[in-house]
Image (cartoon, rainbow, N blue to C red):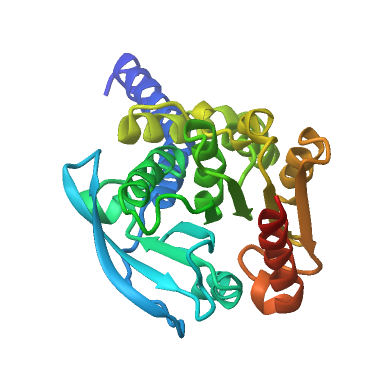
Amino acid sequence: MTPVKRRLILYGAAFCIVLAALLLPVAVGAGMMIGFMMLECTDLNPALDARRETVTFPSAEFNRETAAVLLRGDNSTADSPLVIAVNYADARELSPYLEAGALVLLYTSRSCVGGVPHSLGLAEARQMGDALAFIRGRADLADRTVIAHGYSAGGAAALMAAVQFPNIDAVVAQGGYEDFSARLSEDIRPLQVIAPLFESGVRAAYRIAQGESIDALSPISAIPAIVSRPVLLIYGTAEPSIGGARSMAALGAGAVRLVEISGATHGSYQTTDPEAYRAAVLALLDELAGA
């Protein structure tokens, strides 16, 4: 082999190694985002002792019916508030509402209705409009106070939905991000020089799957538009998003109430301190009843 050919082979190998090194963080970032957007569809049969009515309502996005169940607390009346929540809400989260006599409309996620990737709250916020249309179309539900309830990305969806739908009267959001793009940049900072490559993979995967930028995932931007309505944030002091929750509460200037469950991690609020969780929800219901 001539020296020229040997040099070309070495240059080619070096180029391939560098290219692979550059593409790997991009691929890992894209893979992480794809994992975030995957959602397992679960049965609409919450382990709750409540009267239930199986219902459906149209999906504006997919022109299909959305499966749902309407739960009624034992003490519910014609004036009881109604909670709307997508099905990945833990049944234990809904217990205090039913205990207080509220109604809960628990419905299947848009991912399960249309077989599409989860959008981390953006399109799920629009799906809440379908639930609201169903409520306003039933005489026995139309005039009730409506609470949008959500956990994690569902909490982000509830906050963003409240901007789009003024007839959402209150929001309960648990453990969600305050701004996905800002949170991503903060979390990957330790990656140093490869952080921009990783982030580009995340952004590309979301853009391809959703046709939107992750910059639209910003519940904190919703706070100024909805502070005239009660907003309850429930977060654990041991979860990464607690700082974002404090930022949203500060931006709400006293109109947003943040309840911090001491020692709770992401999603463990009920198991860590069920009484604190229950008290927070009941206090909101009392506030709405006195409004």
Residue 87 visible somewhere in the drawing = no
Q: Can you name the residue that lies furthest to the top here? A: 4
Question: Going by the image, does 67 lie left or right of 196?
Answer: left
Say which residue appears at 61% left-offset and 54% top-offset.
172
Q: Does residue 229 appear anywhere in the picture?
A: yes
Pick the front one: 124 or 139: 139
Residue for point 59% across, 37% down: 219
Q: Measured along the vertical axis of the image, is residue 210 above or below residue 71? A: above
Q: Nearer the viewer, residue 280 or 249?
A: 280
**Where the N terminus falls, by quadrant?**
top left
Quadrant location of residue 273?
Answer: bottom right
Measured as percent of width and height from the top left, residue 135 is found at 37, 51
From the viewer's perspective, is residue 98 above or below residue 188? Answer: below
Q: Position of residue 94 (x, y in %)?
A: 54, 70
Q: Position of residue 249 (x, y in %)?
A: 77, 42
Query: To which quarter of the image does residue 133 belong?
Result: top left
Task: Residue lying at the far bottom in this picture: please name it.
Answer: 49
Out of 6 and 45, give the one closest to the viewer. 45
Residue 255 is left or right of residue 195, and the answer is: right
The image shows residue 182 at horizontal and vertical percentages of 64, 32
- Residue 198 against residue 86 in the figure, above or below: above
Residue depicted at x 65% and y 74%: 270
Vertical order, 148 against 286 (above or below):
above
Q: How many labels sit on residues?
A: 0
Q: Is 271 positioned to the left or the right of 209 in the image?
A: right
Q: Residue at x 66, y 78 (%)?
A: 271
Q: Quadrant of residue 211?
A: top left
Front residue (pair 139, 150):
139
